[in-house]
Image: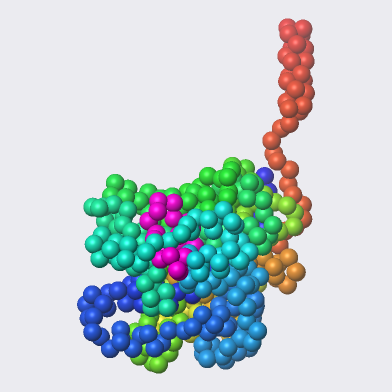
Amino acid sequence: MSYAVIKGASYVLVHAPDMVLHNGTTQTTEKTLNPNSDYLKELPNHLRSYEEAVNYLPNQVYIGNHKPDELRKVSQPWYDKDVEGADRVGKFGEIMPEGEFIGLMKIVDVFDLVQLEKEFTATIKEKLTNHALISEELVSKLKGGEELSVIENQINEHHAEALMFNDKLVGCVKRAHDVDENLNAHVIFENLVSKASGALAALHLLDKYQINPATIDYVLECSEEACGDMNQRGGGNFAKAIAEIAGLVNASGSDVRGFCAAPAHTIISAASLVKAGTFKNVMVVSGGSTAKLGMNGKDHVKKGLPILEDVIGGFAMLISQNDGVNPILRNDLVGKHNVGTGSSPQAVITSLVTEPLDRGNLKITDIDKYSVEMQNPDVTKPAGAGDVPTANYKMIAALGVKRGDLERNELNDFIVKHGMEGWAPTQGHIPSGIPYIGFAREEILAGEIKKAMIVGKGSLFLGRMTNLFDGASIVIESNPGNVEEDKGVSESEVRNLVAEAMREFASHLLKD
């Protein structure tokens, strides 16, 4: 069985300024600890409009309308430089406005936990009816809506979570259990956001690459949320929940968790399942996180910047049997952060980058592009975290010098040639290696590059179960064009082998 291939990748964003105010962890924590803070008073003045979010260059790169290399041609910061002719719809997906997304949350809710106000429902139903990917059957799930008094009662008397749009109450998410904290309205809200954004990415994947939903065998979901109840808090399953909405009638699925590194682990798992022949077509999918909206908002507001963490991210990709054309996933060139590796930057990069390259007799310079933590520096630099991708590329280049793969005076050239500026939103797992996969596939198919490495890293210590760091990587390369035949034996070959064995056995009997 030959290597698995990447047949396509989709990327979606949801502009969610009201969710920044009411659902981002930085803001909800501040409301609890310091409800009259200057930050909370000033925050609404720093929210971007939907048009500003669409016109933002990193967002346009994320959905595929502009290439990563174009970021270097525009001086930082980027937030004050609108893209001319920016479009909501991109080569890889779309930037959905918040109102439509709230409607999508209702559509993907199968337990009637989302209630939307009647007038708002009518408006959103019209918008989603005109959406190219939202079928009539899906739109019908919006139903007719509720009176505002019913929604207010759920919030005031039954602990429901408010759904706000343009700073106006338009609905709520009800709790799913009276006692179980794992099914309270806040958790259900977060889970429905993750499910809806993942489903949107899945629908775009099917559409952009004309994939028959019935051909998908298995779905692996890799967000940072976890659905369950008091008896199994992370029991899942987002994968099958998303598959149901996307119409993947022949698919099963399961969830993979690993903090920010989860997508890299999931791609490796999917490639291995396909290479082993367990499944022919595996969809990898993930929704985004409301908790991380406005995560660095205090620093941005303090410095007079807009809230740039105002979008929820999602992505999906199809990993399939080798077709002799699409880029292959070298699951024999996988990097992993072992328990005994250590957490120093050099130890991490060595385990994730140089060790798998050594197994393939490759130099650091043999990888045309490295996709690391592609965090947007517009977001991270004002927050004091620096330029995360550049820091990663400097470490890889330094190891290259140490190994003799390049000269010291080639360090800066290496960063430019083999690295990229970051463009992904700070959604934890979303920036971790995967934003480049759609571009990598296209560039490999066009012959512009031959090899890319996807590097995901994660912070397991956040869960307070271990102090260990985590990470995984995999090499993607051009398809040599020859699809290896299955090593199995056909039925006719089996009959011939049995006949030959019988003849040999009979011959031995005659001799005896």
Colour style of the rendered protein structure: rainbow
Does residue 118 show up magenta in the picture?
yes
Nearer to me, 28 or 469: 28
Looking at the rendered image, the quarter that the N terminus falls into is top right
State the residue at coordinates (58%, 63%). 129
Q: Is residue 347 above or below residue 211?
A: below
Q: Residue furthest left?
A: 33
State the residue at coordinates (51%, 80%). 50
For residue 306, side relative to residue 64 (left or right): left
State the residue at coordinates (70%, 41%). 486
- Which span of residues is magenta-colored? 104-121
For residue 211, side relative to residue 271 (left or right): right
Nearer to me, 130 or 212: 130
Looking at the rendered image, the quarter that the C terminus falls into is top right
Q: Write down the quadrant of residue 224 in the picture.
A: bottom left
Does residue 416 show up magenta in the picture?
no
Q: Write down the quadrant of residue 217 in the picture.
A: top right
